[in-house]
C-alpha cells in the first residue's frame, strides 16, 4: 500500500544519508558503498514510482546512473518514469541503452512495446493536426 512505500522511501533516504558520512575509505570499501548506494537509489526510485512521485523517481534514477552508468535497472526505471510522463522519445533512448546491455530482458521488451505504441499514436495525431492546418 501507499503507506508502506512512503515508509520505505523514508528508510532508503535515511540509509543514503548515512552512506554519505563515510570518508577515508579504501578503493574496495568505496566500491562497496557505491553498490549499496546504487541499490538504495534504485529502491527509492521504485518507491517513488509506486507513490506516483515521478519527478523524485527521475532524480533517484539519475543518481543511480551516476553510481553505475550501465545499470540496466536504472535505465529501465527512468524509461518507466519518462513513459508515465509521456516523454516517449526520451524513454525510447533509455530503452536503446538498456537493450544494448541486456538484449533479452523481458521487462525492457514489454516497455518497448508500450512506448512504440504511444509514439505511433502521437505521430498519427500530429499528422492529423498537420492535415487540419492545410
Image (tube, helix red, strand yellow):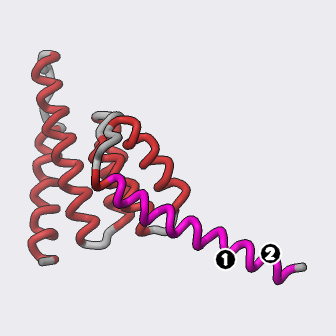
Q: Is residue 133 above or below residue 84?
A: below
Which range is magenta? 108-133
In the image, taking residue 78 as reference, residue 24 lies left or right, namely left
Q: Is residue 118 magenta?
A: yes
Q: Quadrant of the C terminus?
A: bottom right
Residue in view at x 18 percent, y 54 percent: 43
In the image, taking residue 105 as reference, residue 115 lies left or right, namely right
Quadrant housing residue 56: bottom left
Residue in view at x 40 percent, y 55 percent: 79
- Mark 1 lies on residue: 125
Q: Is residue 33 above or below residue 93?
A: above
Q: CA distance from mark 1 to mark 2?
A: 9 Å
- Mark 2 lies on residue: 130
Q: Quadrant of the N terminus?
A: bottom left
Which residue is at the front of the view, 90 or 27?
90
- The local secondary structure at tag 1 comes to helix
Residue 119, horizontal then vertical, whole percent: 56, 65
Name the residue at the right extreme. 134
Amino acid at each position: 500500500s501507499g503507506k508502506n512505500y512512503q515508509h520505505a522511501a523514508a528508510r532508503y533516504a535515511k540509509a543514503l544519508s548515512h552512506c554519505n558520512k563515510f570518508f577515508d575509505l579504501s578503493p574496495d570499501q568505496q566500491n562497496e558503498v557505491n553498490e549499496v548506494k546504487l541499490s538504495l537509489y534504485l529502491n527509492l526510485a521504485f518507491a517513488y514510482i509506486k507513490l506516483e512521485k515521478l519527478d523524485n523517481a527521475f532524480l533517484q534514477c539519475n543518481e543511480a546512473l551516476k553510481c553505475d552508468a550501465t545499470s540496466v535497472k536504472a535505465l529501465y526505471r527512468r524509461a518507466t518514469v519518462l513513459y508515465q510522463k509521456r516523454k516517449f522519445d526520451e524513454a525510447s533512448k533509455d530503452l536503446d541503452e538498456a537493450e544494448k546491455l541486456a538484449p533479452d530482458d523481458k521487462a525492457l521488451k514489454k516497455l518497448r512495446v508500450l512506448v512504440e505504441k504511444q509514439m505511433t499514436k502521437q505521430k498519427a495525431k500530429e499528422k492529423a493536426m498537420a492535415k487540419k492546418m492545410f
